[in-house]
Amino acid sequence: MTERLLRFTVNGEPREVRVADDRRLVDVLRDDLRLTGTKEGCSVGVCGVCGVLVDGALVSACLYPAVFADGASITTIEGIARGGTLAPLQEAFISEGGFQCGICTPGQIVAAAALLAERPRPTDAEIDEWMTGSLCRCTGYAGIRRAIRKAAGG
Amino acid sequence: MSYAYHEPSELDEALALLARHGDDAHAVAGATAFMLLYRQGLLRPSHVVGLRRVRSLGGIRDDGGALVIGATATHREAERSPLVARHCAALARAFASVATVRVRNQATVGGNLAHADPAQDPPAMLLALDAAVTAVSPGGTREIPLAELFVDVLTTSLAPGELITAVRVPALAPGTRAAYVKFLPRTADDYATVSVAATLRRSEDGRVADVRVVLGAVGPTPIRATSAEDALRGAAPDAARIAEAAALARDAADPIDDVRGSAAYKREMARVWTERALRSLVA
Amino acid sequence: MKLAHSSTVPVPVERVWTVVMDVPRAAACVPGVSGVSGAGEDRFRGDLAVQVGPVRLSFSGEVAIVARDDAAHRATLRADAKEARLGGSVHASVEIALARAGEGCALRIESDLQVAGRIGELGQPLIQRKADQLLREFGACLARTAA
């Protein structure tokens, strides 16, 4: 018994997938479900590019056993926009220059969405603390912070 | 070769699985540390026993003035718990100091203690607060004071197949103040170069009635700087006395050279940060 | 990775030297060693089980005395071991030197360790700490055995 059928919802859609017990959520999302918006960077939970929400909680999908997701509701970057329209947060990343090469952007946006769900009007200090460990190696963090502030209506 | 994952809902079932599979089994709660070691190829269990569905291991409660944090409570639950904040704000801060929000959403309080990483934040603070874990095995239940839990790097006094069910933080004597400070010269989500957890209570004449000083990240386990405590106990905690105690804390540190600093530098920083922690407690 | 260990044993240097050069007897002083047997002149095979936290390692290999000076109480050993559980190997060159220290004997062991394969993932600080611990226990046991 080293394989099982997992049932969960991804971005609101019910999914079933048969996985080996030791698979990571990031692999199931990218390889089995072809949701490649979630990236893999450091593979050790440090860089933040694989950030997804499991029942609303932000986790690193590279550290998250897929078996833990059984029965859960998962949100990936593909679930942030609705009906082909970018979310205000995504628009804010564009207008404020919150990215350059883009590799970290899915993780940044999912992390920021989790922050705004919990604290709709975060202070700059709260933004900085929350976004710690969502690494960006080209733009720097000022644009990202501006984008989050803008999406929060500030 | 994958392992077989088991997710029992009862503690007895978890203990039975661990007993049945012995060395071939590994218990996980949040599984953050396990996933790292497994992916590095350092652990090769045939069976993994997940504790997350065992209800009796979760939750945070007050037990007659003592704070009891269930083993599978996440760091995030602990840092946001009004019970934890009311018991000791510095403890909530120590939980909030761990890595990033992503890790704190997944990693558990019991798993952190069982992993016994001396550079982690909660162990030092919990040791300063005189906490003990409740451990259960097929042979029964026992309390292990934190001072006896940590044996070496990544090594505890838990017997094979024995599980932490909760950590218990006794009521603080009225007037006790607590501090947790963490020196992070690199990034905010890094392990500490040195961390200091301290508690201090003064008597009516202003002298130190009780004090505990614990150093994190500068030894194979969190280190209680008892000589520094002795220098303060019964004394008026003026700047000179605090400086003297901090110098003794430096001597208690047993660090190694690594990317977070040379051993000599870490010892010196143990002095500096102990002084800062103690000053904040008498300010 | 270089390791240095020194300790003082309250036993005359000749007695300690006899034990150290009796490899199966000396090896019994290393915690976790088992199954030591001869494998030719000045060569020995054996197993070593080591636990670093939750990580269990099991080495199997050979130790050879490559140089010895009985008068000066100095010897050079070469150890080559494979780790079977996780995969990896350790190669070590070990210099042992004994010297008179009052009534007793000063023991100095200098090792140069090459760690290869997956066990290297443990990282130098942890490997170093474990090796230090083994050497410390070896020194203490040697004192008891030679006394």
Image (cartoon, coloured by chain):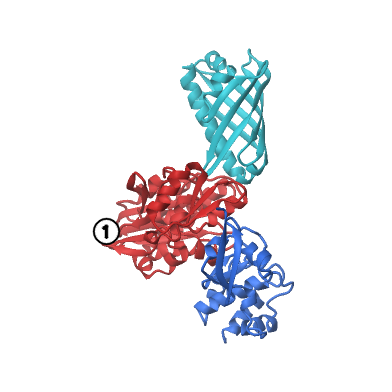
Q: Chain of mark 1?
A: B
Number of labels in the image equals 1
Rendered location of residue C62, percent (x, y): 65, 26
Q: Is residue A113 visible?
A: yes
Identify the residue at image location x=55%, y=13%.
Answer: C14
Q: Quadrant of residue A135?
A: bottom right
Identify the residue at image location x=38%, y=68%.
Answer: B85
Location of mark 1 (residue)? B203
Q: Chain B's shade in the image?
A: red
Observer-nearest residue: A48 or B163?
B163
Image position of B68 with respect to A111: above or below: above
Rendered location of residue B142, percent (x, y): 33, 47
Amino acid type, label 1: Ser
Colour cyan, chain: C
Mark 1 surroundings within 10 Å by alpha-carbon count, few (fewer than 14), some (14 through 19), many (20 or more): few
Colour blue, chain: A
Q: Is residue B13 left or right of residue A17?
A: left
Observer-nearest residue: C47 or B11?
B11
Q: Is residue B64 left or right of residue B224?
A: left
Image position of C125 with respect to B125: above or below: above
Rendered location of residue C13, percent (x, y): 54, 16
Residue sitting farthest toward the right: A101
In the structure shown, which secondary structural element does the residue marked by tag 1 occupy?
loop
Rendered location of residue B226, percent (x, y): 38, 46
